[in-house]
Amino acid sequence: MNPHDLRESNPSVILLILDKNASEFGVNEMARRCDLTGTTVQYGNNVSHANNKTRRRWLPNLQKKRVWVAEEGKFVTVKITASALKTLDKIGYTAMKKRFDSK
């Protein structure tokens, strides 16, 4: 089924097709997750002075960074949290990868 054939008849059908076949059309949903530590979004409540609770999210401080891996002799692009980046600077990529792969 070609999505362009359905454009004139029903535009909402196009959106449904794009959602189901997102990878075919080059649309990727990226996870908010650290590549090395696995840190992800945390959920909780905002609590007002009147004790009203509304749901909220705490997003990790993710940064996209190119890291030189001396053992492989190449750059590796990682999506990593800022705190994990400090640890990576201290102990190195391979040691950090080994530490968190065992968990």
Image (tube, helix red, strand yellow):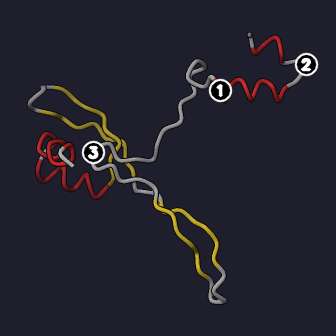
Which residue is denoted by mark 3 in the rendering? 36
Q: Does residue 83 sit above or below 69 in this rendering?
A: below
The x, y position of residue 77, in whole percent, is 30, 34
Q: Are marks 3 and 1 in contact (CB under 8 Å)?
A: no
Q: Nearer the viewer, mark 1 or mark 2?
A: 1
Quadrant showing the N terminus: top right
User: Could you tell me how far apart the alpha carbons at marks 1 and 2 are, in whole angstroms?
Assistant: 19 Å
**Location of residue 42 with respect to 10 vertically, above or below:** below
Q: Position of residue 78 (x, y in %)?
A: 31, 38
Task: Work out whether 27 lies above or below 52.
Answer: above
Give the camera-side residue of 83 and 103: 103
Residue found farthest to the front: 103
CA gap between label 2 and label 3 equals 46 Å
Q: What residue do we see at 8% from left, 30% from top?
A: 71
Disc ID at residue 68: none
Number of numbered discs present?
3
Whichever of callouts 3 and 1 sits on the residue coming sooner in the sequence is: 1
Q: Amino acid at mark 1?
A: Lys
Mark 1 or mark 2: name the one nearer the start of the chain: 2
- In the image, 75 versus 54, the foreground residue is 54
Residue 95: percent from the left, percent from the top? 11, 44
Residue identifier under label 2:
9
For disc 3, the neighbor class at 10 Å (few under 14, some 14 to 19, many from 20) is many
Query: Where does label 1 land, which residue?
Result: 20
SS at badge 2: loop
2 or 3: tag closer to the N-terminus:
2
Q: Secondary structure at mark 1?
A: helix
Under circle 3, the secondary element is: loop
Snapshot quadrant of residue 73: top left
Is label 3 or label 1 in front? 1
- In the image, is 77 to the left or to the right of 54? left
